[in-house]
Image (cartoon, grey):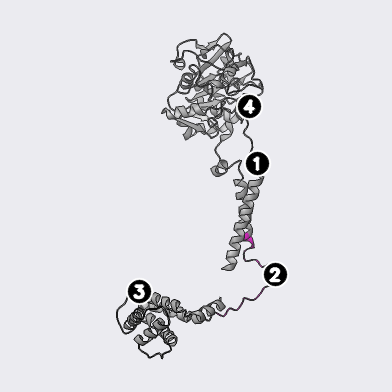
Amino acid sequence: MRQRLTIILTFVVIVGVLVIINTVKYVKQEKLPDSELIPNRSTYHSGPTGARAFHDFLSESGYQVMRWREAPEKLLGKTGEKVATFVVIGTTRLPFSQEQIIALHKWIAKGGCFLLIDRDPPLRLLPKTGEWSVYSRLLDFPPLDIDPADASAMAKDVTPFTPVQPTWLTRDVQSVLPSRFAGRLSVVPAPLPSPSSSKAATGITVASRDDDEEEEALPLAEATKVSRAPVIHVADGNGALLVDYAYGSGRVIVLSDPYVVTNRGLSANDNLQLAINVVTAHEGLIAFDEYHQGRGATGNPFAVYFSGTPVLAIGAQVLIVVLLILWTNARRFARPLPLAQVDRRSSLEFVASMAELQERARAFDLAIENVYTRTRRVLARYAGLSYNSSRSEIAERIAARSKVEARQLETLMRQCEEVINGQPINWRQAVDLVKRLREVEKKLGLRMRARDARQAAENI
C-alpha cells in the first residue's frame, strides 16, 4: 500500500509540475484587430467585419438557420435536401476545390438557392448558362489605415443605392448603404462557344475566370431550364449591387458588398431588410458556409474547444507519463530480492477475531465481561484491595483517593455485573458501558491498554 501511495503521489507531483511549466511558458496570442484587408466574415465572429449579429438575429426571429461546417459535397446527400439557401460571405479563408464547385453547381441545378456576398466574387463559383456572364469590378480598395468599426469612414462619400425595380428581393427596401469598397456587378452576353466544342450539343459548359478550368457539363434536361437573363435589383450609375439569375431549377443571387450583412453595416439604412430578403428568397433552411471560413467540423470537438490553450499540451504530456508508468509496471531494473518475511502473528489478532465473532453472535455480555474483568482487577489494585472485594468497598476506597464519585462508580460496576449475569442488552448500551469504563480509567490515570498499543506499534 505504501508503494502504491508513493507512485500516486509521484504522479500527482509530476502532473503539477507539468501544469506549472506549461502555464508559465504559455504565451497567449494577441487578438489581431479587424481589418478590411484581411476580414473575418464568419458568423462566429462578433467583430465589425463578422456576420454574427445577422445570424443571431435570424435565429432569434424564428427563421431556420444553421452554420454549415461540412464540405459542399454533403449538399448532394440527405443533409443537403433540407437546405434551401446556401450562403457564402466574403473571401473565404479556405478556397473551393474544383470538386466542391461541381457539387455546389449540381445542388443549385436541382433547386437550391446559392447566395454569394463578395466584392469580387470568384467567377469559378458562379455557374454560367452560356448566354450571360456576371462579373464584378472594384472602384476603390481598402487602405491600410481604414477602421472597419468606423461607419463614417467605411461609407465616406457613398450615395445610398435604391432599387431599380420592385421585386421580391427589394420589398420594403427604400435605400441601401454599402461601403465605399463595394463592387459593381455587370451583366453581359457570354461569348458564343467555339465550333470545336463537343459539349455544346449535349450540355452547357460552366465557364470560369481561368481559361484552363472547366467543370463537368450539366445534363441537357437541366440546361433547358436556364433561359432567363439575370435580373438587376439594386444599382447606381456605376453598376449593380444585387443581381440574381436562374440556373437549372435553382437560383444564384450575388450581392457585391459583405458590408451590408456585417455587424457594423447591418444597421445602416435598409441593409437589414435587404439582407433578410436575399437569404429568405427560398423558403426553408438557411445554411451559412463556415467550412471555408476555417470552422469545419472535426472528429474531435474537445481538441477544437481547447485549441490555442496549454490544455492540449498538458494532456499529451500526462498521457506520456501514464504510458511510461504502465510500461514500467512490473518491470525489474535490478537483481531480484526475496520478499520480506513479516511476522503477522499478534495478540491483537485474537482480540479482533473474538470481537468480530461476538458482534456477529450479538454476544454483548461476553464483550462486557472481557472489558469489565480486566477493569475490575485494575480498580481493585488501585484501591489496595483484593479482586474478590465487594464493589461498594472498592468504590469507597477509589473515591477516597480520587475525584471519582463512589455512588456512580458502584452503579457502573453493578450494571456491568448484571449484564454479565444475563441481563438483556443491545449494542448501543454495550458501547455506552465500555465508554464509561474507559472514562473512569482516564480519570484515574490507568494505562491498562498501553501494552496492547505497544505491541500493535511493533507489528506495523
| Rendered position, 116 above or below 418 | above
Let me know if residue 130 is in the magenta part.
Answer: no
Secondary structure beneath dot 4 equals loop
Left or right, residue 410 beside residue 95: left
Q: Residue 427 — which label?
A: 3
Question: Marks 4/3: CA distance?
Answer: 80 Å
Which mark lies nearer to you, 4 or 1?
1
Which stretch appears magenta? Answer: 325-343
Secondary structure beneath dot 2 equals loop
Chain-order first, disc 2 or disc 4: 4
Question: Marks 4/1: CA distance?
Answer: 23 Å
Residue ID for mark 1: 27
Which mark lies nearer to you, 4 or 3?
3
In this rendered view, identify the residue nearer to me: 120 or 31. 31
| Percent of width and height locating residue 270 | 48, 17
In this rendered view, identify the residue nearer to me: 61 or 281. 61
